Amino acid sequence: MAMNKRWVSWRLLAIAVLLTSSATAFAQADLTNHKVDSNKIVQQAKDSSYSLSERGLSELRCDVEPDWDSTFASTKTAASFREQVLPLLKAMRFQAVVGGTGVAAVSHQLDAAPADQSVADRVRDAANGFEQIVDGFFESWSQFMVNSPLPEPDGKYSFEARDGAYYLSLKQGSDDVDIVMSHDLTITETKVAGREVNGTIDPHFIKRQDKLVLDSYDAEPSSSQKLDVSVRYQEVRGLLLPELVEASMRLSDSAVKFPIRFSGCRVKLSSH
């Protein structure tokens, strides 16, 4: 018996739609309803990420070189600032020390004497501001490169698979932390809410030494501020360490750039 070709086409289309719908429903059910081994997934994610602590880092010490010309080129500064303050800032030496837990201490030294107290105050304010920027960078960078924002696989956290991603919620001290991770085990967002810290970081990774290495991140310290940071690395004793950080703070009506170079880096390794 001959079949109408149009009927055959519609029948095949209906079967294809049915199969596609069934496959989609099955995939969604597989992501949301089946017993996801959250411990295994979190462990695999931690294993795929680069970790300086696992490589035995106990201390990182670097000279820190700001690019004051680039920074102040993107801001409106008075001529007196450029003439009296900027030369002293360029003569200032900064150093950062990062411990094995990722906590940084930034300090500076200036041998020259400011002309008066007003200049001294302005130099101090600029130096302290820069130290806070470096400290803030290490605080964000170390949670992905020294430690991991992910919990211990058998620790206390909630885990949900939905919308093609994994969602984790946990406590870090008194802070509430939410983490979004794609199915290739890459963290795409971390959000912290607490009494002292509130903000979101969207990290971006590349593969180096067969591990996921933080390449850049976008952060929102507040509703009116957005921070874009990219990191170029150097190898010191086989460890990947920051060499050049390009930071840009986007404000409501302007943007300020903070190029930061790390040189003369020395590391101490633990014996384990």
Image: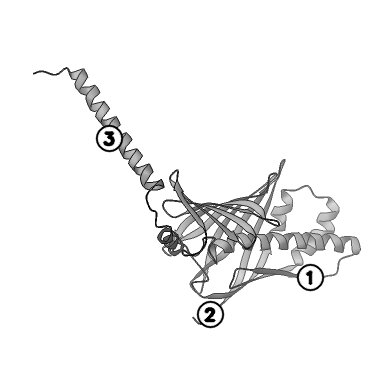
Q: What percent of the width, then of the height, locates residue 160?
A: 47, 50
Q: Which residue does the numbered mark 1 point to in the structure image?
A: 110
Sooner in the amino-acid sequence: mark 2 or mark 1: 1
Residue type, label 2:
Ser
Sooner in the amino-acid sequence: mark 3 or mark 2: 3
Q: CA distance from mark 3 to mark 2?
A: 56 Å
**Left or right of residue 184, residue 156 in this image:** right
Sooner in the amino-acid sequence: mark 1 or mark 3: 3
Q: Which residue does the numbered mark 2 point to in the structure image?
A: 270
**Secondary structure category for the residue under label 1:** loop
Identify the image quadrant of the N terminus: top left
Residue at coordinates 41% horizontally, 53% vertically from top-left?
A: 184
**Left or right of residue 167, residue 218 in this image:** right
Residue type, label 3:
Leu
How packed is label 2: few (under 14 Cα within 10 Å), some, or many (20 or more)? few
Instruction: Pick whichever, 36 or 221, lies toward us.
Output: 36
Q: Which residue does the numbered mark 3 point to in the structure image?
A: 19
- Residue at the outermost left position: 1
Q: CA distance from mark 2 to mark 1?
A: 33 Å
Up/down of 41 relative to 55, above or below: above
Q: What percent of the width, then of the height, locates residue 19?
A: 27, 35
- Residue at the outermost bottom position: 271
Mark 3 vs mark 2: in front: 3
Up/down of 248 relative to 21, above or below: below
Instruction: Pick whichever, 205 or 25, lies toward us.
Output: 25
Instruction: Pick whichever, 14 or 83, lies toward us.
Output: 14
**Secondary structure category for the residue under label 2:** loop
Residue type, label 1:
Leu
